[in-house]
Image (spheres, rainbow, N blue to C red):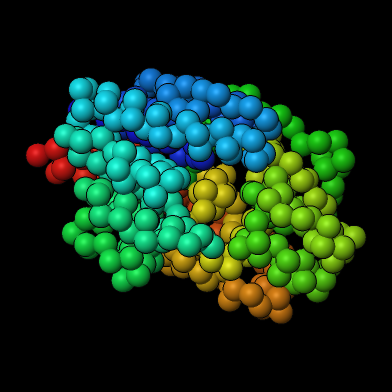
Amino acid sequence: MHVHVVDPPAYTPPYDHALCAALARAGAQVDLFTSRFGYGEVPGAVGYTRHDQAFYRWAPGPPGSAVRRAARAAQHGPDMVRYARRAPRDADVVHFQWLTLPQVDARLLPGGVPLVLTAHDVAPRDPRPGQLAAWRRLLACIDAVVVHSEHGRARLVDELGVDPRRVRVIAHGAFAHLAEAPSQTPLPRELAGVETPVVLCFGLIRPYKGVDVLLDAWREVEGAELWVVGLPKLDLAPLRAKAPASVRFVDRFVGDDELPAFFRRADLVVLPYREIDQSGVLFTALAFGAPLLLTAVGGFPEIAAQGAARLVAHGDPAALAAALRELLADPAERRRLGAAARTLATSALSWDTIARQHLNLYGELAA
């Protein structure tokens, strides 16, 4: 089977790589059509072919800048048309990871080939006028929508009206390739010398991720450090102002070579999100066997139900502080959570398992 995996904006290079490599190991011929990732190196293609200039070859300005966003928007239509002409000639199935302009994408999809879309975000966050209706129209044009949790499936069916027969729950895989990377950079010197327990909050810093709630909770925690690590997508000044002295910010993009050192050093990983379906940071932590403290939102309870995480109510600093203190004082419980994470990462959430589930779906559509 010849599979095209398509991620025009290159939003999720680790996910794209893990899926493509696992599909290739399972015997599929795989091509990844994407654009250049602006923040750093991406994993090398293993067993598949990557076309990283299939979209947005003109990329002026720094990543995330207004000029780059405008350049991408201008190129999106022509690039989609060019890809749509190619796809039916050599693909048995086309699997989109992201379609960022639903207002136009529904009219630019390839014809004559089964189409799959992974709804990494079940619905647009803070949608602009007309965007949610456009998303519904786009979903109606897709033969099968993959979502990473039963929570996401329910939202697609109940809120967005997607035919349940076209929705398939396939879990997000644990990013084992990050833990196994041969080239790994040690922690920065100022962090390597920390001797107290470390709680890690990792990933792009956005309002929905609840870092402000975490900082409120952290005022009630002693004898440990909190590391908030990731590229800010908001004004960081208010967060810095409320942070106690035991909080360190690493406010930049952390590449795949640096990432392992942070997760291996962490005594606990906390994701205090206000809302989510699933999170790539969660599946990175699982791959490292890191104990997890999650808020009870989206698909997170489905991971906790398998013993790999502790849950706490979202938006509740007092409850979060109590859970942090309890887990920091209980190394045995952290070891138990870490062991459950490793087991889950190498079984139900291994990419080889997930690739077989995708191939089963592709085969049904192709038939």
Q: In terms of image quadrants, where is residue 288?
A: top right
- Furthest toward the right, the residue is 245
Quick check: 252 left or right of 118?
A: right
The quarter of the picture where residue 315 lies is bottom right
Measuring 70% from the left and 45% from the top, which residue is drawn there?
A: 231
Who is closer to the viewer here, 3 or 218?
A: 3
User: In percent of the image, x 35 and y 40: which residue is there?
Assistant: 96
**Residue 172 visible in the shown view:** no
Task: Say which residue appears at 55% left-offset and 45% top-offset.
Answer: 284
Residue that protrudes farthest toward the left in the picture: 367
Q: Is residue 271 above or below residue 28?
A: below
* Residue 283 image position (x, y, % from top left): 51, 49
In the rendered view, would you say 183 is above or below 355?
above
- Image quadrant where one finds the N terminus: top left
**Residue at image x 40%, y 34%?**
77
Q: Position of residue 111 (x, y in %)?
A: 20, 36
Q: Quadrant of residue 137?
A: bottom left
Residue 206 image position (x, y, % from top left):
65, 56
Can residue 124 be seen from the camera position used here?
yes
The foreground one among 50 and 129 is: 129
Residue 303 spot, x, y in % from top left: 45, 61
Task: Check the image and report above or below for 7 versus 201.
Answer: above
Side (left or right) of 123 relative to 250? left
In the image, 163 versus 148, the foreground residue is: 163
